[in-house]
Image (spheres, helix red, strand yellow):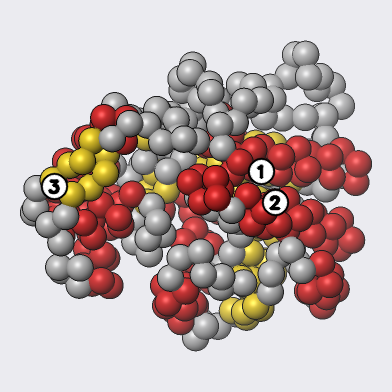
Amino acid sequence: MKVLITGVAGFIGFHVARRLLSEGWQVLGLDSLNDYYDPALKQARLALLRPQAGFRFAGADLADRSAMEALFADQPFDRVIHLAAQAGVRYSLENPHAYVDANLAGLLNVLEGCRAQQVAHLVYASSSSVYGLNTQVPFAESDAVDHPVSLYAATKKSGELLAHSYSHLYGLPATGLRFFTVYGPWGRPDMAPIKFARAISAGEAIDVYNQGDMSRDFTYIDDIVEGVVQVLDQIPAAQPGWTPEQGSRGQSSAPYRIFNIGAGQPVGLLDFIQTLEAALGVQARKNFLPMQPGDVARTWASTEALRQQTGFSPAVGLEEGVGKFVDWYRAYYGPSV
């Protein structure tokens, strides 16, 4: 089986590629290796993939239409896993065009490639951020997601709509995965776990927003990868009897599905910090601040739809996951970085 993985040098893409390579897949990994965060970390991930049998790398920008057309014309793919995106909520407040280029124009190029090649299944990354102003928890795929609070979230919601239109018009089977606060080894340095670990290890204060009154459905990377792998062969079929008035918003009359992938267990931000403190063996100094623009107070995933479809439920607990993250952090960055 041949698979295209976009964002292969990113946090999730790297782990998905390693998993599929270990199972004998042929992986073409695409990444622009941009400098949104330290490219050295992306190169270090890539260095672990390059020697593996069945792996090839293509350096290209998703928004480069000609490059993407050439990539899809070069060879057929059995599956496409689209994980590349411009991430980060706060960065979107200052750099909105980067999000439209990567998350909309880039996705459109992937959809066009899948349409032209008649790819059997497109699996793409969405985000828990699409739930926006929703307050009813846990967040379920049947919920309306019409009120995003950041441009990043708006582009992810727009991406779901683009994918649905291609499923409806061209019969492209597409599955969107709404990831909830992913953490673990090889994580992004702009996210809280590494920012916190670095500051705590250095004896510096960490910024704690909304006075600490926040919770997140922290999901360990291995559970995210398992969810992605589980849905690869769960190719959505058209449901002619489905209607918007009676059906779940996570489904369609087209061959289209949406699933949450989260631990299904929200954790208070202060509890997460306490768990990280215990793993590091250092107590944090905390700088309590108001809520940031574009942020939400809590996230919590309903994982019932994923369980019913695949039989899989995320299983890695917070203490175990944070412990593995800290072990990697110290091995990669050093004990006092």
Quarter holding residue 330 = bottom left
Judge from the rendering whether residue 81 lies leftward or rightward of residue 236; answer left or right: left
Checking the image for residue 284, the label placed there is 3
Q: Give above or below for 88 relative to 313.
A: below
Image quarter (top left, top right, bottom left or bottom right) of the N terminus: bottom right
Marked residue nearer the N-terminal end (1 or 2)? 2
Q: What kind of residue is marked 3?
A: Ala
Residue underneath mark 1 = 155
x%, y% of residue 195?
30, 55
Badge 1: residue crowd in 10 Å (few <14, some 14–19, many ≥20): many
Q: What kind of residue is marked 1?
A: Thr
Residue underneath mark 2 = 100
Residue in the picture at 82% in, 67% down = 65
x%, y% of residue 15?
47, 63
Q: Give above or below for 292 relative to 206.
A: above
Q: Are marks 1 and 2 in contact (CB under 8 Å)?
A: yes
Quarter holding residue 8 = bottom right
Indicate the secondary structure of the residue bearing disc 1. helix
Q: Give above or below for 19 relative to 267.
A: below
x%, y% of residue 218?
36, 41
Marked residue nearer the N-terminal end (3 or 2)? 2
Badge 3: residue crowd in 10 Å (few <14, some 14–19, many ≥20): many
Judge from the rendering whether residue 296 lies leftward or rightward of residue 308; answer left or right: left
